[in-house]
Amino acid sequence: QYTLDSNNIMIDTENTETQSVKINGFAGIYFYNKGYHNLLWDDGMYIFNLTVDISVEKEEVIAIAESVK
């Protein structure tokens, strides 16, 4: 989790395709890279970054993100 004014976040998306997703109504980006699911979204105050290994399905990753309060 980062505040929105943190503008030095580096994310490796080389050789990946990103997908737009909605997390609790907020825009997010999902991508799979190097054996990990990655999901980033913001809620207007914070940027959240969720990284989960391949043993979890994409749908479960999104459900975990949606459980963040």
Image (cartoon, rainbow, N blue to C red):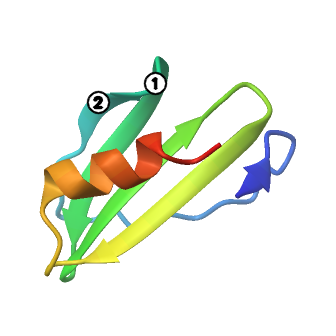
- The image quarter containing residue 42 is top right
Judged from this view, the residue extending furthest toward the top is: 25
Q: Quadrant of residue 20?
A: top left
Q: Where is residue 10 in the image (x, y as percent from the top left)?
A: 58, 64
The label number, if any, that marks residue 15 in the structure image: none
In this rendering, position of residue 52 left or right of residue 23: left
Location of mark 2 (residue): 20
Q: Residue 13: x, y in percent? A: 33, 61
Front residue of 14 and 27: 27
**Crowd around label 2: few <14 · some 14–19 · many ≥20 (10 Å):** few
Q: In the figure, 3 relative to 54: above or below?
A: above
The residue sitting at 39% across, 54% down in the picture is: 64
Q: Tell me the quarter of the image containing the C terminus.
A: top right
Amino acid type at image mark 1: Ala
Residue type at mark 2 is Ser
Task: Residue 6 in the image: state x and y as whole percent.
Answer: 83, 51
Q: What secondary structure is marked by label 2?
A: strand
Q: Which residue is drawn at 29% across and 57% down?
A: 61
Residue 2, quarter of the rendered image = bottom right
51 relative to 41, above or below: below
Label 1 – label 2 distance at C-alpha: 7 Å
Report whether 47 appears left or right of 5. left
Helix, strand or loop for disc 1: strand
Quadrant of the image containing the N terminus: bottom right
Residue under the point 35% across and 61% down: 38
- Numbered label attached to residue 27: 1
Q: Are marks 1 and 2 in contact (CB under 8 Å)?
A: yes
Q: In this orientation, which residue lies closer to the viewer: 45 or 56?
A: 56
Name the residue located 24 percent from the left edge and 44 percent from the top edge: 18
Please state which of residues 55 and 12 is positioned toward the viewer in this rendering: 55
| Disc 1 residue crowd, few under 14, some 14–19, many 20+, Cα 10 Å | few
